[in-house]
Image (spheres, grey):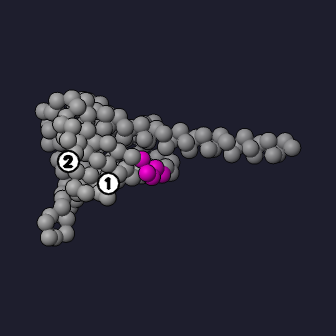
Amino acid sequence: MRISLLLITLFFSTSLCAQTSADSVQQVISDFFLGMKTADTARMRAALSPSVHFEGTQPRPDSEPTLVQESVSNFFASVARSAAGMLDERIRFEVVKVDGPLAIVWTPYEFYYNGRYSHCGVNSFQLVRLNGKWMIQYLIDTRRKNCK
């Protein structure tokens, strides 16, 4: 009986720990997009590692998409020029995997500019835990007009 109780306690405490890690990872990403929606670049920067990389696929008519490395500073400048509510990326968390200090997250999204649908796609995040804090290390996304 004591062994069963010990195993049950160990199982639930392990589950809670893993759940807490996934929730923490999701919160960092949610904070990043809330910062974008409210034009709060300080909030966005707090979610990023010092050596973060942004990349994206750019669709091209009648051709394969190209991979483009995006300038983080240009991205922040664009957000800073925007009014609160102008940039609204609505994400869904589909996959969150955590192993120690590394996490991956897959978020399909729809992007709205000034309240109007612009495009959709998927974000793929790599996060690292540095000094006790989850931070986005790498973000790559797809972009297209129709995601159905």
- Amino acid tagged 2: Ser
State the image coordinates of residue 117 (x, y, percent, origin top left).
22, 45
Residue placed at 25% from the left, 30% from the top?
38
Please tell me which residue lies in front, 116 or 24: 116
Q: Is residue 77 magenta?
A: no
Which quarter of the rendered picture does the C terminus lie within?
A: bottom left
Could you say which quadrant of the image residue 62 lies in? bottom left
Residue 76 lies in what quarter of the image? top left
Q: Which residues are magenta?
A: 93-97
Q: Can residue 137 be seen in this snapshot? A: yes
In this rendering, does residue 55 appear at all?
no
Q: Is residue 61 above or below residue 95?
A: below
Q: Residues at badges 2 and 1 in contact (C-beta under 8 Å)?
A: no
Say if 115 sits above or below 94 in the image. above
Asked where in the image residue 65 lies, by quadrant, the reply is bottom left
Q: Residues within 10 Å of mark 1 (few under 14, many from 20)?
A: some
Residue bearing mark 1: 122
Label 2 environment density (alpha carbons within 10 Å; few <14, some 14–19, many ≥20): some
Residue at 14% x, 38% y is 78
Q: Is 80 situated above or below 91?
A: above
Q: Secondary structure at mark 1?
A: strand
Spot occupied by residue 59 in the image (x, y as percentages of width and height): 18, 61
x and y percentages locating residue 81 in the rendered image: 13, 33
Q: CA distance from mark 2 to mark 1?
A: 14 Å
Left or right of 131: which side holds 58? Answer: left
Query: x and y percent of residue 69 in the render?
Result: 19, 55
Secondary structure beneath dot 2 equals strand
Residue to which mark 2 is pinned: 118
Quarter of the image that includes the N terminus: top right
